[in-house]
Each structure stands twice: as C-alpha cells, then as structure tokens.
Image (tube, helix red, strand yellow):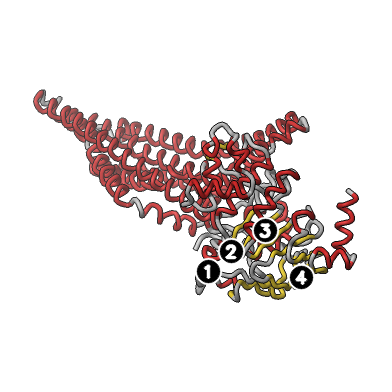
C-alpha cells in the first residue's frame, strides 16, 4: 500500500488548484513509497546483479594496487630486483586497466537499467492518470500534473538505478578497504575510521532540514511549471489584454522563489560534502603524522604510502556516499510526488462483480438520483425521469442548474451518490465502464482536437474506421465541404488544440467523431454552440438522421436545436420543475416559456 498523503483542510483542498499554492510537506521519508519503488528495481535485477558483480570484482582488483606498490617499495627496490619491480608495475597497470574496463561495462548495464526503470514508472504513472476521475483534474493545475510525468521521473531515475547500486558498492568498498588496512597496520586503520562517528552525527542532525529543503524545491518547481503551462495555454488572452508585462512579473516572482529554495537546499547539501571532505583531510593528515613520528621506525615507507593510499580510498567512498545521500534525499522529494499520484484512488472503476453491458435498446431511467461535487452544495436533488428508446430528451435551464451533471452521471464520469441510473434495466454502477461507454456517443461542451490529421481526429471515435466511413460521418454533419477545401483535405495536419481551424470547424470535427462511433445513446452537450446559423441547419439534418433508433440527450441554449425534441426537461436548482414538449411547455407559460421569451427579445 502506498504512503497516505497528509490530510488537508477543506480550505486547502479548495485552493490547491492554483499555480502559487504549495503542496504539502511530509515530515519524514515514506518507507512505504521506498518499498514500492523497489518493485521497479526488481524488474531489472539481472542487469543490477551483473553490474554489482562487476563492480565488486573491479573494486577488489583495483584495491590490490597499493599492495603492489608497497611490495615494490619495501622488497623489490631495496633488493635491487628489477624483474620483481617490473612484475609489480605490470600487476599494478593490469589491475587499473581491468578495474576501469569492468567499471565501463557496469556503467552501460546501469544506464540501461535506469532507462527501463524510467520507462516503467512513467508508463504506470501515465496509465494511472488515464483512469483518474475528472475531479482529480478539476482540483489541480495541469502543469503540476505534467511535471510529475516527465521532469520528476527523469530526476529519480539516477537515484533508483545508480544510487542504490552505488550505495551497495560503496559500502562493500569500505569493508574491503578496512580489511586491507587492518592487514597492513591495526593502529593506522583505527586512526582512519575515527572520523566516522562525527560524520554520522552531523548527517543525523541535518537530514530532516535537507529533506524539507528539497521538498520545498519540488513545490516551487511545480508552481513554476504550472504557471508556464497556464500562460502558454492562455497566450491569446494574454496578448488580447496586453498582460505580457504582468505575466513576466509573476514569472519573475515564481522563479525567484524557486531559486531561493534551490540555493537553500544546495547550501545544506554542500555542508554534507564540506564536512565529509574536512574530516577526511584531517584523518588523512593524522595517518601520516602518526605513521611518520609516533610509530617510527615500525612504519616503513612502503607501509606508510600504502596506508595513505588506502586512507584516501577509504574516505572516497564515504564522500561518494554523501553525494549519494544528497541525490537520494533530492530524489525522494520527487518520488513522494510521483507515488502519491499513483496512490490517488481511481474512484470511477469497475466494481469487483461488474458485468458486461449487452447490446442495448436505449431505455434510460434516473431513479431518485442526488449528487454533489462538495458537501457544501447539492447539484442534483432527487432527480427522476425515464427516456424511452429512440426518444430525444432536451435539458434546459440556467447555468449551474445541473444539466451537464446529469449526462456526466449517465456516462459515469462521476459516481452516483444516491439513487440509481438504469439502462435497459441494468444499474450502470454494476457495469464495466468499457461496455457502457462503447455504446454511448458523447460530445462534451469543450471540443478537443488532438495533434494529427483531420481524418485521425474523426477516426478517434472508431479506430478501425475506413476512409469511406470517415468521409460519410463528415458529410452527414456538414464538415465535408470545409475539409475538402483545406490544402490536404482529410490528411491536413492539425496542430495542438486545433490551431489553424476555427472553433466552429473544431466542433464539426468532434461531432463527426461522435457520429462515427455509431452509439445507441447519444449525448450532445452544447454541440452547436460555436456553429453559425447556416452551418447549424446542415448539422440539424445530420442529427435527425443519427437520432433514428437512438436515445438522445441534448443540452443547448439555442432553442432551435431542441424545439423538435420528444421531451424537454427544465432543470432549476438541481430539480426538474417542468417536463413536456415545446408546444405544451409554451402553452403552460412557465419557466421554459419565460426562457423562450427572453431569447426572442434578444
């Protein structure tokens, strides 16, 4: 089970969907998250074990070098044995070359393992994001989500591959070096390791400050990324209102906050490095002083040189461990954010006993359905109605009345809190999402265009559709003419968010996408809001054709779009206050009548 996030107050949850609101700070490292990340390391255990074996072998061979030097100085040179001196030199050169070769192979194995870990984490994170409910995206800026998928995952790859492996290797190196040192001289070996308790105490004192500092850096990076993405998405509004200078001031403030926290974190991290270096140099000096003066004449020149070499080698992995610790603390700040995202509950999911929805006729029933996005305000209050197969239902009413919420619940974009929604008698909460949505055609209020060709965007509703089916769908809703007039017709590439075509043309493309899916239940949420009157007439013909044999739900403010519907439901304050055809509701002169009169006056 992943680490649970710090509980936030309602006000904190309400305000977190802002680029300048910091996320929570954990008081301590989550061991649960750390254990969870080990599963990614297990997937590359073959490469990691091979790299570890090569590292140990290379380390042992490399550590034999000072022994060859000592033997050459204390035996070969005093005896004037040139052959032995050359042999020791060749052994020394061979140990260095073999150690470097093993290290190079090890680095390749670790690099490949690191990339596999990055891929797996990013794949799992992105897959989870695809299944999270709309409420998750409603509550935080997109930039704070994006930064976790790309930059944060890249940042932790080295900590999970190189970091853990190097940690094991450096610990083993310390043990190996201690073995060699105690074989040479016990007293000098004890002098070498006497600085370790001091360093351990210092790290223990600073570890919490260092972790919190890097968490603050993570927050400021997230804020900066969120604002940059928001500014890019809203660049047209920025230029229209001449907000460039104001935006630059905000960016400058966020960047300054990020730089301030970065420098604070670097300062704390560098104190670890500085303290380790200082202690190592003091110990290094004591080894030579003790060996040269206090132990004279017991310490030979070769012994002293070898111990000095081993002392340097002993403290080098400790310095490396300090750097690994800094990388680990930095990486854990990002890992917390990544795994907290993966730990977000998938609220809209198949029930354990969910069943497949068979081909349906389209009978829809709302039975005493109530719903709220927050405890403060109820959106739907005891809604009940029935839509017969092939019936067209229009939902009208003021903004915020609950119209979109009704169709969102029917599509199971949110879970039903009270009551039931039935399709052909099946409770949709007990159906698989895939089988439910495969028989529904949904065109939301916000038209979204993906990067690719126009044909690709239409085919998104049915990936195996032929070119003829794509063209037929476009012709049905009146998009064929403008598409054919484009430079490359249906193969015309569209940039992100549909740049290069009008908003009305984007809606036509998304409408064709919905038609192509051939749904049994059709949902159109403000489907013609950005289409001009002339084009709307073409779309209406397509809608009439599509509606035959299908249950349809329309949300529209244009009365021309809904007046021919089988039934009109007037929604006000989460309740159905009027129901009937256009003619009967006009005759009753109630809320719907007043709405029509207001539009006619406009």
Query: Disc 2 or 1, which lies upstream in sequence?
Result: 1
Q: Residue beneath label 2, please? A: 520
Where's residue 527, x and y in %?
Answer: 69, 52
Alpha carbon separation for disc pair 1 and 3:
44 Å
Determine whether label 1 and label 3 are within 8 Å by CB: no
Residue beneath the point at 44% across and 39% down: 323
Q: Where is 567 relative to 169, above or below?
A: below
Disc 4 from disc 3: Cα separation: 28 Å
| Horizontal and vertical percent position of residue 135 | 65, 57
The numbered mark, 4 or 3, whose residue comes first in the sequence reads 3
Judged left or right of residue 16, residue 293 is left
- In the structure shown, which secondary structural element does the residue marked by tag 2 occupy? loop
Label 1 belongs to which residue?
A: 359
CA separation, marks 2 and 3?
A: 42 Å
Disc 1 is placed on an element classified as: loop
Q: Are marks 2 and 1 in contact (CB under 8 Å)?
A: yes
Question: Who's the residue at 49% across and 54% down the image?
Answer: 127
Graded by Cα atoms within 10 Å as few (under 14), some (14 to 19) or many (20 or more), the crowding at tag 3 reads: few
Q: Which mark is residue 381?
A: 4
User: Disc 4 to disc 1, how far (Cα)?
Assistant: 30 Å
Mark 3 sits on what residue? 8
Viewer-side label of 4, 1: 1
User: What is the spatial separation of the Cα atoms under label 2 and label 4, in whole angstroms?
Assistant: 27 Å
Q: Quick check: marks 2 and 3 in contact, CB under 8 Å?
A: no
Kindly state the secondary structure of the residue where label 4 is placed.
strand
Structural crowding at the residue carrying mark 2, measured as other residues with C-alpha within 10 Å and reported as few (<14), some (14–19) or many (≥20): many
Residue 93, percent across and down?
20, 29
């Amino acid at each position: 089970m992943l680490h649970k996030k710090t509980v936030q107050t309602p006000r904190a949850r309400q305000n977190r969907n802002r680029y300048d609101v910091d996320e929570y700070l954990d008081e301590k490292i989550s061991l649960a998250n750390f254990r969870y990340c080990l599963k990614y390391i297990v997937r590359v255990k073959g490469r990691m074990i091979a790299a570890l074996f090569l590292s140990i072998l290379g380390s042992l061979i490399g550590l034999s070098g000072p022994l060859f030097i000592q033997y050459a100085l204390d035996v070969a040179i005093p005896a004037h044995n040139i052959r032995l001196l050359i042999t020791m030199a060749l052994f020394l050169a061979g140990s260095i070359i073999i150690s470097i070769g093993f290290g190079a192979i090890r680095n390749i194995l670790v690099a490949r393992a690191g990339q596999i870990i990055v891929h797996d984490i990013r794949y799992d994170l992105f897959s989870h994001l695809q299944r999270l409910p709309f409420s998750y995206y409603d509550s935080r800026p997109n930039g704070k989500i994006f930064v976790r998928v790309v930059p944060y995952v890249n940042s932790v790859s080295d900590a999970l591959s190189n970091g853990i492996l190097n940690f094991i290797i450096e610990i083993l190196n310390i043990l190996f070096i201690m073995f060699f040192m105690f074989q040479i001289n016990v007293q000098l070996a004890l002098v070498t390791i006497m600085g370790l308790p001091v360093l351990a105490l210092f790290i223990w004192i600073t570890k919490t400050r260092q972790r919190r500092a890097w968490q603050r850096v993570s927050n400021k990076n997230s804020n900066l990324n969120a604002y940059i993405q928001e500014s890019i998405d809203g660049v047209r509004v920025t230029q229209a209102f001449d907000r460039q200078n104001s935006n630059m001031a905000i960016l400058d403030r966020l960047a300054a906050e990020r730089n301030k926290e970065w420098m604070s974190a670097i300062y704390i991290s560098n104190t670890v490095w500085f303290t380790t270096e200082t202690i190592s140099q003091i110990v290094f000096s004591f080894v030579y002083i003790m060996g040269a003066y206090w132990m004279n004449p017991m310490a030979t020149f070769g012994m002293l040189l070898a111990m000095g070499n081993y002392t340097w080698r002993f403290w080098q992995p400790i310095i490396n461990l300090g750097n690994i610790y800094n990388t680990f603390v930095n990486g854990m700040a990002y890992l917390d954010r990544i795994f907290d995202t993966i730990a977000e509950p998938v609220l809209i999911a198949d029930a354990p006993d969910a069943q497949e929805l068979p081909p349906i006729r389209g009978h829809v029933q709302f039975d005493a359905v109530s719903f709220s996005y927050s405890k403060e305000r109820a959106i739907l209050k005891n809604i009940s109605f029935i839509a017969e197969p092939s019936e067209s239902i229009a939902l009208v009413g003021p903004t915020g009345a609950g119209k979109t919420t009704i169709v969102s619940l029917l599509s199971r974009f949110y879970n039903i809190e009270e009551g039931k929604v039935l399709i052909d008698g099946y409770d949709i909460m007990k159906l698989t999402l895939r089988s439910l949505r495969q028989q529904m055609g949904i065109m939301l209020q916000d038209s979204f265009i993906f990067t690719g060709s126009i044909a690709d965007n239409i085919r998104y509703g049915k990936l195996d559709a032929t070119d003829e089916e794509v063209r037929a769908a476009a012709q049905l809703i009146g998009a064929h003419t403008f598409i054919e007039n484009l430079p490359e017709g249906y193969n015309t590439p569209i940039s992100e968010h549909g740049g290069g075509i009008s908003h009305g043309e984007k809606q036509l493309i998304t409408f064709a996408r919905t038609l192509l899916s051939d749904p049994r239940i059709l949902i159109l949420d403000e489907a013609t809001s950005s289409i001009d009157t002339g084009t709307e007439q073409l779309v209406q013909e397509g809608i009439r054709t599509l509606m035959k044999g299908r249950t349809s739900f329309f949300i529209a403010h244009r009365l021309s779009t809904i007046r021919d519907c089988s039934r009109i439901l007037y929604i006000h304050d989460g309740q159905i206050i009027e129901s009937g055809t256009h003619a009967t509701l006009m005759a009753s002169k109630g809320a719907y009548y007043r709405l029509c009169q207001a539009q006619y006056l406009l």
